Image: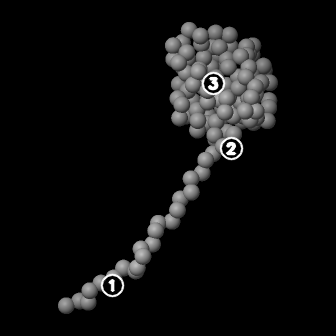
Amino acid sequence: MSYANAVIEDKAAFERALDTPEPVFVVFFSHDCPACTDAMPRFMRISKRYGARVKILILDCCNTPRHPSVKSIPILLVYQDQTLRQTIPGLGEEALEIAFKRFTGDCVTRQVSAPEQPASPAAPPPPPP
């Protein structure tokens, strides 16, 4: 997995960073943000499980031009094929897990078994009086 604590100077540099076959997970945060301080260890722990299947950019809002989809921090923007596919404000654990599984193809499918059939057929209704 490639982590980049990057400084993006402009839109062209951002687009170059997205030019990769892997999904790109872009985290916007700030060192001065208490919610970011809380969320980043969770993000790092979850992201480590996905190896070389994703590219991760960690961008400090103080050193990065404003992005139109960033309304609050921390926030994760997920790009695939240079297109924004998902935003995850707050970096909640369940939302992060789902996003990593979705974009790395690690979706867990649950098998649904057919309902059990009764051991014997139901008794016929009583005859009318």
97 with respect to 26 (left or right): left
Q: What residue is rendered at 55% in x and 15% in y?
A: 37
Quickly name the residue at label 2: 105
Residue flagged by tag 2: what amino acid is it? Answer: Gly
Depth check: 54 or 18 in front?
A: 54
Image label count: 3
- Name the N-terminal-most of marks 1 and 3: 3
115 with respect to 106 (left or right): left
Callout 1 secondary element: loop
Question: Could you tell me residue 80's position as x and y percent?
Answer: 72, 35
Quickly name the residue at label 1: 124
Q: Is residue 58 above or below residue 18?
A: above
Q: What residue is rendered at 33% in x and 84% in y?
A: 124
Q: What residue is rendered at 80% in x and 24% in y?
A: 16
**Distance between mark 2 and mark 1 Cα atoms:** 50 Å
Q: Quadrant of the C terminus?
A: bottom left
Residue flagged by tag 3: what amino acid is it? Answer: Met
Q: Residues within 10 Å of mark 1 (few under 14, many from 20)?
A: few
- Name the N-terminal-most of marks 3 and 2: 3
Q: Quadrant of the N terminus?
A: top right
Q: What residue is rendered at 41% in x and 74% in y?
A: 118
Q: Is residue 6 visible?
A: yes
Q: Residues within 10 Å of mark 2 (few under 14, many from 20)?
A: few
Quickly name the residue at label 3: 44
**Distance between mark 3 and mark 2 Cα atoms:** 19 Å
